[in-house]
């Protein structure tokens, strides 16, 4: 995907690097799932997990739109994820 200019500071990217603040993600159970019978999760960015930040704080990941392109961001309603077993 080609980026046009610099995205806002609240956007999340991996930049292809490991063990940095932008590569420290975790999944946690969604607090109020849309469907109580289906387990769902949210994605969080936790920089302290890989030593990038001494503060023990995680940020919920949501989607943001910038110049018509959808990105992962650290503001807004958390993105609800459901995992489904792949069929063979």
Image (tube, rainbow, N blue to C red):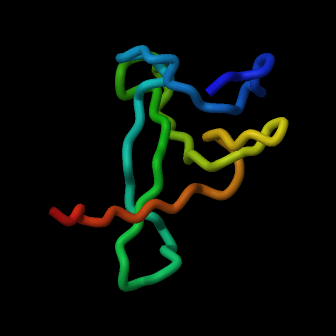
Q: At 80% from the left edge and 17% from the top edge, which residue is drawn? A: 5
* Residue at left offset 51%, top offset 73%: 32
Q: Is residue 28 above or below residue 36?
A: above
Horizontal side of 11 relative to 58 (left or right) equals right
Q: Is residue 23 above or below residue 57?
A: above
What residue occupies the far right of the structure in this picture? Answer: 67
Nearer the observer, 41 or 7: 7
Rendered residue at 59%/56% (across/down): 78
**Is 85 situated above or below 1?**
below
x 30%, y 66%: residue: 84
* Picture quarter with the C terminus: bottom left
Residue 85 in the image: x percent, y percent? Answer: 23, 65
Q: Residue 36: x and y, percent?
A: 42, 83
| Residue 50 as seen in the image, left or right of residue 2 | left
Query: Quarter holding the N terminus?
Result: top right
| Residue 63, x across and y down, in percent | 65, 48
The residue lying toward the viewer, choosing from 32 and 15, is 15
Q: Residue furthest left?
A: 88
Q: Position of residue 18 (x, y in %)?
A: 36, 17
Q: How many marks?
A: 0
Question: Which residue is at the far front?
Answer: 88
Task: Indicate the quadrant where residue 28 lies.
Answer: bottom left
């Amino acid at each position: 995907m080609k980026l046009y200019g610099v995205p806002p500071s609240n956007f999340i990217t991996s930049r292809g690097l490991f063990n940095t603040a932008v590569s420290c993600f975790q999944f946690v159970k969604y607090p109020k799932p849309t469907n109580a019978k289906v387990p769902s999760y949210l994605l969080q960015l936790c920089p302290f997990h890989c030593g990038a930040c001494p503060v023990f704080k995680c940020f919920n990941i949501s989607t943001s739109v910038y110049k018509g392109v959808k990105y992962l961001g650290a503001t807004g309603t958390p993105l609800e994820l459901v995992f489904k077993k792949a069929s063979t």
